[in-house]
Amino acid sequence: MKIFYGTENLPRFRHAVVAVGSFDGVHLGHRQILATLKDAAAKQGGESVVVTFHPHPQLVLHPERDFQPIYTPEENAQLIAKEGIDNLILVEFTPQFSQLSPEAFVEFLSQKIGAQAIVMGPNHNFGKDRGGNSTTMREICAKYSMEIIQIPEFVMEENRVRSSQIRKHILNKEFTEAEKLLGHPLKKNR
């Protein structure tokens, strides 16, 4: 997997199929997104591209909260690489970046990355104030001739698998429960 720090000097990816998110912990739900991303890129004869952020958006948007990411960006990158993804772009998440409108964000994906398709779950929100959602995304992406590949939310034992739930388990020292949702052992730094 090729890793790019920032968006300057990116190559033009071949038929880029993109997934965007924090991917903190690279849990079972993330792995479903990454598998779909990899398959869609292969079907299009293209490259899989994950766009993620550093620092975690919550640390920038809500510095007053005691937010603890599950893993470091480097640890998440290692887990993403294990899923067979072609490219990972780490974008610096700043207060200015957080102000991009949903349309400006899609334009960023189109112009900087050359996104042909975007893989997203049903609850993914993006852009300023999380103003972009699965409905608005379809409208915006149509303007840029981008395909939307929407996948269902990953549910395990009637529970939605989310990073926030894993963080709660870790905070409560319920490590076995956290590992079930992650689908892999926790790193030893806990």
Image: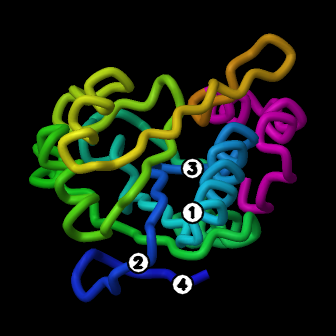
Which of the two labelled residues, at mark 2 and mark 4, occupies the earlier sequence position?
4
Circle 1 residues within 10 Å: few <14, some 14–19, many ≥20: some
Q: Which residue is mark 4?
A: 2
Specify the amino acid type for callout 2. Answer: Phe
Numbered disc in front, either 4 or 3:
4
Q: Which residue is mark 2?
A: 13
| Separation of marks 2 and 1 at Cα, in angstroms | 12 Å
Q: Which residue is mark 1?
A: 44
Q: Which residues are magenta?
A: 165-190
Give yes or no for contact between labels 4 and 1 (Cβ–Cβ under 8 Å). Answer: no
Circle on res. 24: 3
Which of the two labelled residues, at mark 4 and mark 3, occupies the earlier sequence position?
4
Q: Is residue 77 visible in the rendered structure shown here?
A: yes
Q: Is residue 110 left or right of residue 163?
A: left
Specify the amino acid type for callout 3. Answer: Asp
Which of the two labelled residues, at mark 2 and mark 1, occupies the earlier sequence position?
2
From the viewer's side, name the closer residue of 104 and 164.
104
Instruction: Tell me: residue 158, above or below residue 131.
Output: above
Q: Position of residue 164 (x, y in %)?
A: 57, 30
Give yes or no for contact between labels 4 and 3 (Cβ–Cβ under 8 Å). Answer: no
Q: How is the image coloured?
A: rainbow
